[in-house]
Image (tube, grey):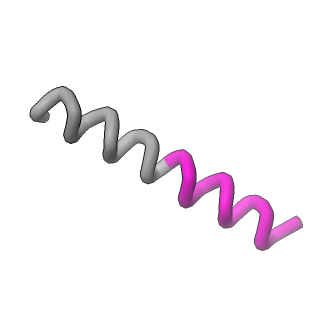
Amino acid sequence: MLANAGVDLHFLLRSTYELVSSQGL
């Protein structure tokens, strides 16, 4: 469960980072 949450958090951070990068912010 804890490892699963870590994966979800990593995916969320990566998705946010890619979204921001694609917008040039």
Taking 3 as reference, is 6 left or right?
left
Q: What are the residue bounds of the magenta stretch? A: 1-12
x, y percent for residue 17: 33, 46
Q: Is residue 13 above or below residue 22?
A: below
Which residue is pictured at 67% across the width and 65% down the height? 6
Main SS type for the magenta part? helix
Q: Quadrant of residue 15?
A: top left
Q: Residue furthest left?
A: 24
x, y percent for residue 18: 32, 42
Which residue is pictured at 60% across the width and 55% down the height? 9
Taking 3 as reference, is 16 left or right?
left
Q: Quadrant of residue 21?
A: top left
Q: Quadrant of residue 1?
A: bottom right
Taking 18 as reference, is 6 left or right?
right
Image quadrant for the C terminus?
top left
Q: Residue furthest top?
A: 23
Between 5 and 23, the one nearer to me in the picture: 23
> Is 17 included in the stretch rendered in magenta?
no
Q: Is residue 10 above or below residue 25?
A: below
x, y percent for residue 8: 67, 53
Q: Is residue 14 above or below residue 24?
A: below
Which residue is pictured at 11% across the width and 33% down the height? 24
Which residue is pictured at 55% across the width and 59% down the height? 10
> Is 9 included in the stretch rendered in magenta?
yes
x, y percent for residue 5: 74, 60
